[in-house]
Image (spheres, grey):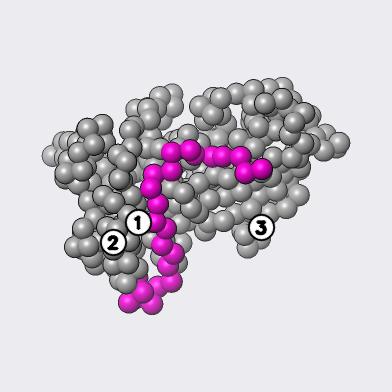
Amino acid sequence: MASEEFQEVRVFAPATVANVACGYDVLGFAIDQPGDEVVVRLASEPGLRITKITGDEGKLPLIAEKNTAGIAALDFLNHLEKSDLGVEMEIHKKMPFGSGLGSSAASAVAGVYAMNVLLGEPLSKKELLPFAMSGEASADGAWHADNVGPCLLGGIIFIRDNETLDLASLPVPENLWAAVVHPDIEILTKVARDILPREISLPNVTRQVGNLGGLICGLLQNDYGLISRSIHDVVAEPARRQLIPGFAEAKKAALDAGALGFSISGAGPSVFALCEGEEVAQKAGAAITEIFGGLSLGHQLYLSRVNQRGVTVMN
Ligand code: HSE
């Protein structure tokens, strides 16, 4: 696409489910909704200016150098030696902070991808990964691509090594659905990371590695039984579930409703049930929301296949 075709670009970056139970910091998938939107347009005044942010309750900085989407976009412009380019950016937050849905990753990905399209796509989506990562790391303080990877590229992404961003896209079984439920509480990722054990026992390392390998094999072989047997987390979930009211009951309800597995989405408080088919996902979603509703906890339910497109242009 030639740059002159795009004076204004609007993009959508989807929410993501990181960890997927047994893949702490190394596995994640994208869903269809919710997601953040970013608009960029060329402007005569040099430099990147954030002119509008909606949906953030005034929490996000308008200063580009301090804003997740702005940092990702600026890093990218610096790389291209175009930091003087005049650009205006609008950010429309469409998902809550501290939700476990990859909110900061979505903003970072949307910021850098919109800029890439505005400039006529000089880089591939995969080449945008480091810039989106620096945007997200500015919000989260940690360097893990399990939200940014699937948000950018779509699908289910396995990260062999976060430092070098060596990642692989896994096949998505056709009838795989997710019921993702966000209960209306906020858990800061930093808090949810600080609560994790510093050391893991050797038997638990063996269990976690076995389950991660099993889940990947299950996806490769379209084997729902193997997927189901592998969705267990002995590392993060045991430490984090106490932060989510009704977690044990919601898990039992989802599994009783036929879900293949259930765990925390990213750092929480959102939870997810992976399911074979839409009907089971609907039942599992209803069962989870009933538990949160019974605790008078507001919540949002998202039913989705795995989103295979990742970030997309809307206009
Ligand atoms: N893998 C990360 C965590 C995801 O569990 O802390 C949170 O963004």
- Residue at numbered disc 1: 179
Residue under pointer 2 = 284
Residue 48 location, quadrant: top right
**Residue at (32, 67) in percent of width and height:** 286
Q: Position of residue 223 (x, y in %)?
A: 20, 38
Residue 139 magenta-highlighted:
no
Q: Amino acid at mark 2?
A: Ala
Tell me which segment is drawn in magenta: 292-315
User: Can you give x and y, in whole percent of width and height, for residue 174 in the image?
Assistant: 32, 41
Looking at marks 3 and 1 on the same chain, the residue that comes earlier in the sequence is marked by: 3
Residue 166 location, x and y as percent?
A: 40, 24
Q: Amino acid at mark 3?
A: Thr
Residue 101, above or below 148:
below
The label nearer to you, 3 versus 1, is 1
**Along the line of sight, the residue nearer the viewer: 250 or 70:** 250
First of labels 1, 2 by sequence position = 1
10 Å neighbourhood of mark 3: few (<14), some, or many (≥20)?
A: some
